[in-house]
Amino acid sequence: MWIRVTLGLAAMLISGVAQAKDLRGADYYLPKCKSIFEHREQVDVAAGACLGIITALTDLSPFFETPFKFCPPPQLDPATAMLMVVQYIEQKASQKLKEPFIGLAIEALQETFPCKK
């Protein structure tokens, strides 16, 4: 239950900032996430938010239930997870860029780190 509240609060935080432009979409976050790897001296707040979203998702993953469940290794570096999300969105979800970034990040992490049955 509290996971839904946490995800809801994260979504509200992101959507609360969005007034003139939709700041929830992957089309907004993808270039910001990539900027961390490409231009470290030009990283802005949104790039930090991207890393924060990925870190929160991987840290909270043990508490997720289906359909949000994924199982990353405990030693996963947040920057590595973010790179995997960026690559997934570019390679497999480029037609979904208007969808919320958090949803695509979960989708990417689920495909990258499926739970063993």
Image (spheres, rainbow, N blue to C red):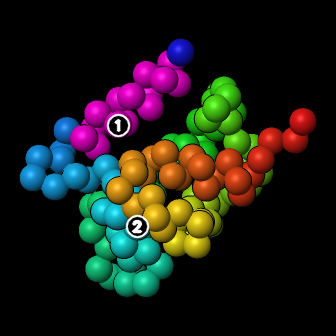
Q: Up-down: is 60 above or below 53?
A: above
- Residue 93 percent coordinates (x, y): 53, 63
Relative to the observer, which residue lies in front, 113 or 25? 25
Q: Residue furthest front?
A: 95
Q: Which mark is residue 113?
A: none
Residue beneath disc 1 = 11
Residue drawn at x 53%, y 15% is: 1
Whether residue 113 is visible, yes or no, is yes
Residue beneath disc 2 = 30
- Residue 104 percent coordinates (x, y): 51, 52
Does dot 1 land on a helix, a strand or a loop? helix
The amino acid type of the residue labelled 2 equals Leu
Answer with left or right where residue 53 lies relative to residue 83.
left
Disc 2 versus disc 1: distance between alpha carbons?
17 Å
- Residue 84 percent coordinates (x, y): 61, 66
Q: Up-down: is 2 above or below 90?
A: above
Which image quarter: residue 112? bottom right
Q: Quadrant of the C terminus?
A: top right
Q: Main secondary structure of the magenta part?
A: helix
Whether residue 79 is visible, yes or no, is no
Q: Residue furthest right?
A: 117
Residue drawn at x 35%, y 56% is: 98
Magenta segment: 2-15
The amino acid type of the residue labelled 1 equals Ala
